[in-house]
Amino acid sequence: MSSILRSLVLITLLAGCSFSGGNKNPPRNLDNACSILDQRRSFLPAFRAAKRKYGVPISTQMAIIWQESKFKADAKTPKKYKLWIIPAGRQSSAYGYAQALDGTWKEYKKSAGRWGASRTNIRDAADFMGWYMAQSRRSLGIAMSDTRNQYLAYHEGRTGYRRGSYKSKRWLVNVANGLDRRAAMYKRQLISCGKG
């Protein structure tokens, strides 16, 4: 093999290592919205696009993505086991930044006409969340800035939310209350660094 060809192969391999999984790991300091956006330059344009299109605040998007995936692009639900040792699949089909279920993601792609959308793409994940929350606003009357109730509808599904299924899940109500506080914290931080 010629030295030029070897060099090209080496450069290709190194480029693949440095760029292929660049954003699969979550950013550091997940308690600081400004730091997250500084580390992931593609996030702010994605969140702003969803805000313009659907009216969902950036801080709400960020709080829910923090809860769902901790900003990890290829996040999956934990594995299930039979007899504590035999793998039996995952807890659900939730995947990606927004932890969208297979069926809901398929519905989104069809309804929004976004056939090439990927759950590991932040722009697509943010658009999905905006789309879902806009439907919750229309059918349930939940304001886009109401992080707590938007999350409850997101987690339980709109039918479950309408039935009040979350009311018997104290842990879920506590999570939703915490997300309301996190969204408020992110909002203050975003204003302070001029990204709100």
Image: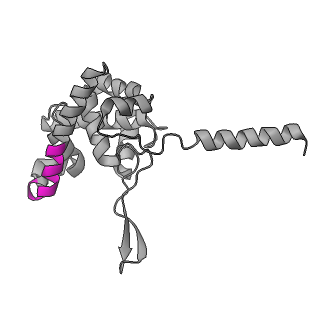
Residue 141 is drawn in which quadrant?
top left
Q: Residue at image x 83%, y 42%?
A: 6
Let me know if residue 37 is in the magenta part. no
Task: Give the magenta part as a residue range.
Answer: 167-178
Residue at the extreme right: 2
Residue 55 is drawn in which quadrant?
top left
Q: Magenta region, mostly helix, strand or loop?
A: helix
Q: Is residue 110 above or below residue 42?
A: below
Residue at the extreme front: 29
Q: Residue at image x 61%, y 40%?
A: 18
**Depth order, front residue of 154/162:** 154
Quadrant containing the C terminus is: top left
Residue 112 is drawn in which quadrant?
top left
Q: Position of residue 177 (x, y in %)?
A: 13, 44
Let me know if residue 177 is in the magenta part. yes
**Depth order, front residue of 194/61:** 194
